[in-house]
Amino acid sequence: MKKNYLLFLLIASAIVGVSCSSDDEDIISTNPFDNSEIASNDRNKIVIISDLHLGNDLEYSENVKHLKRLEEFLNEVRSSVSIKELIMNGDILDEWYIPTRLDSYGGGTQADFVRKTVAANQEIFDVLNGIIKDGKIKLTYIPGNHDMGFSPENVDIAMPGINQARDAGEQFGVGTYHPDDYPEIAIEHGHCYDFFCAITPNANEEEAPGATLPPGYFFARIAANSFTDPTTHEEATKVPNVTLNNADNAEQYSKHIYYTLWKKVMEDVIYVKDNFYDSIIKTNVGNYTKTYAINDILPYNSETDGSIQINLYNDLFTQDNWDEREKYNNASVMTKINEAIVGSLETSFIDDQANVQYFQNSESNTRIVIFGHTHIPMIKSFTNLQGETCVYVNSGTWEDQKTRDKSAAIEQDTLKMNFVTIEPVKTNKEKLQVALYQYRYGEHLLVENKEVDL
């Protein structure tokens, strides 16, 4: 009996010794990240997520129902022995999605806002900061539009020591990231090609000197109002009619396109019951200090000459202005302003910028591009100017499925929660597999994968 007991102890000790080893190659892992057909014992896998939209207040945050699954997912990342880097590709924090009548920072500072966001999502930030402290997996943050205004110092409050990928220059709200050893991979949020969401310098100098927040910021504020104080299509306030009186004037034509876009979203997507003349959009963020009415954002016909004018962003609607704005956002290839305005809603325009800005750009050697921003996950193949296969992936979002009916039964566990992996095929570092997944019921559901031979 004693002999059998000693034998049991020896076997148990051996098992514990393997499972607790500090060397990754000695660990027998059941982690789903470590069990793919091409996984090796090396840390060579890159994981990309985006659009977490971690809010300041869970009463109205875009991500509440998915938080537990996100925590579970991040713990899988943390315990993986094959992941070398987790890249968070924009809209991780959320400074935009705040109901209109609330002061953005609640009377405090941006640093206070960040601390409150961390407290509201404490379990998520505990895991993220654990990844940083472990020192085994590199954690990288790229700014998106909903977090474009956060200073590097304030992001560091939430995640001390995180690698922040920001483009050089005075603007810190955009960044294109090339992972270590892979200059052929470009990862960026994608908002810099979006007319509504690209950084907007010198747009409203009389109203807010130095402000750079784009029109999309006000869209997000109204959208939050639409879901926290819901109404019906029938009872919603209708957008006043605006007439294009001079179709030969390029600026007027662009403004009318902008108007038709606002009319569509205000009547079909983010409809509200507010009087458009009432000052309801409190700001106190990004050099905006006033409280604005919805009519300050919407185009109108001038009583003087019938031309289309706007109280905010009135001077944006020329091709020259859009070109300068795109250069400020570090875009490589200039696009047509009217296509960019429409593309803010018809998001295939933004996804196609992977091809326009990279694969069909003779100055680019990029073969793999990852965007977020549109919230529509996809993976597509392209051919570049050299005839080589290229891959574009959109990493989707982790926000909840929105509903105005709080009692509606929505199976959130089957919706959204996408992520992307990039890893060498077997031991061939020059051949990469790019895969799009959904985190469905806590399982890794492969949507599609493609290979790129570098």
Image (tube, grey):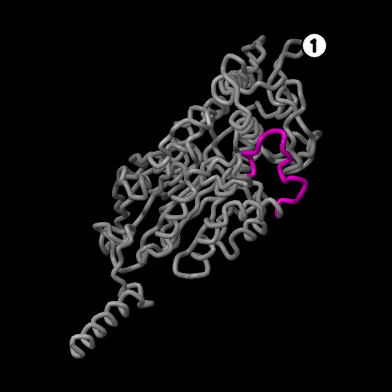
Report the quarter where the N terminus lies: bottom left
Give whichever of 281, 47 is nearer the camera: 281
- Name the residue carrying label 1: 304
Magenta residues span 95-111
SS at mark 1 in the image: loop
Q: Is residue 440 above or below residue 183?
A: above
Judge whether residue 385 is colored magenta.
Answer: no
User: Relative to residue 301, is residue 148 drawn left or right?
Assistant: left
Give whichever of 140, 320 is nearer the camera: 140
The majority secondary structure of the magenta stretch comes to: loop
**Residue 452 x %, y %:** 31, 50
Q: Is residue 13 above or below residue 107?
A: below
User: Relative to residue 71, is residue 338 drawn left or right?
Assistant: right
Residue furthest to the front: 1
Report the quarter where the C terminus lies: bottom left
Judge whether residue 96 is colored magenta.
Answer: yes
Q: Is residue 236 above or below residue 350?
A: above
Does residue 224 appear anywhere in the picture? Answer: yes
User: Relative to residue 289, is residue 218 drawn left or right?
Assistant: left
**Residue 306 x %, y %:** 73, 10
**Residue 189 x %, y %:** 51, 45
Quarter of the rendering containing residue 4 = bottom left
**Residue positioned 56% across, 47% down in the render:** 54
Say which amino acid is labelled 1.
Thr
